[in-house]
Image: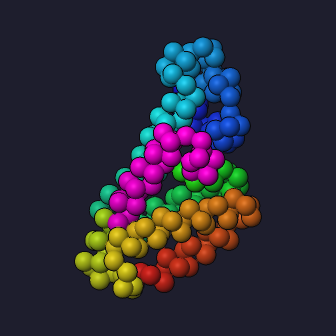
Amino acid sequence: MVEAAMECFHERGFNGTGIQDIARTAGVPKGSVYNHFDSKEALAAEVMDRYAVSRKMEMLRDETLAPVPRIRAHFEYLAADLERFSFERGCMFGNFGMELSNQSAMIRGKVDTGLRLWTSAVTEVLEEARAEGALATALTPDQLGRFLVNAWGGAVLRAKVAGSRAPVDGFFEVFDSLVA
């Protein structure tokens, strides 16, 4: 059911998705949703928890790749996922953050936590890259990690608006200039 909700929310947003949509996608009666979750907001919170760990974090922990190629592969994977949906879906962190941050403190907190976890994972790999001398910037790994996650969010938003990969390619141009 959570996977069905994730699919619906990612495609139509929180406010554009009804419980009936989720139930239909999951192939269950509408009442089944409320057997597992007190509210649509509680279901969305669970979706955010899962989305935060489904962002291919294991790619960032794969030490068989050097740090810089590992980070690039992570973002390339995310770019391919955006492209698979013709840039229409964007990122659920960004989508939920924009749609619900003034509407739900619970979801705002979940989005913030997810972004912090992601930034921390990117920063850890950047610390490895710095130790190997693979960063071409004076920025600290923490500064660069925050910048990359924030810049990715902006590039995804622009790609969604433009329906084009060009903003994502711009992200990679800057990424490549920051690493040796």
Residue 140 appears in the rendering? yes
Total labels drawn: 0
Compared to residue 86, the image places residue 22 above or below, namely above
Compared to residue 150, the image places residue 179 above or below, namely below
Residue at image coords 55%, 25%: 39
| Percent x, y of residue 93 | 54, 51
Task: Name the residue nearer the viewer: 174 or 36.
Answer: 36
Position of the N terminus by quadrant: top right
Residue at image coords 69%, 41%: 12
Instruction: Please identify the quarter of the rendering in which residue 31 is found.
Output: top right
Residue at image coords 38%, 63%: 122
Task: Name the residue nearer the viewer: 11 or 43.
Answer: 43
Residue at image coords 46%, 44%: 110
Task: Name the residue nearer the viewer: 109 or 155.
Answer: 109
| Percent x, y of residue 99 | 63, 47
Name the chief secondary structure element in magenta: helix
Which region of the structure is painted magenta? 97-123
Q: Answer with left or right where residue 158 lies relative to residue 59.
A: right
| Percent x, y of residue 170 | 61, 75
The residue sitting at the left extreme is 131
Q: Answer with left or right where residue 9 lies relative to residue 145.
A: right
The residue sitting at the right extreme is 162
Identify the coloring.
rainbow
Residue 51 appears in the rendering? no
Instruction: Please identify the quarter of the rendering in which residue 116 is found.
Output: bottom left
| Percent x, y of residue 35 | 51, 15
The stretch drawn in magenta includes residue 91: no
The stretch drawn in magenta includes residue 120: yes
Position of the C terminus by quadrant: bottom left
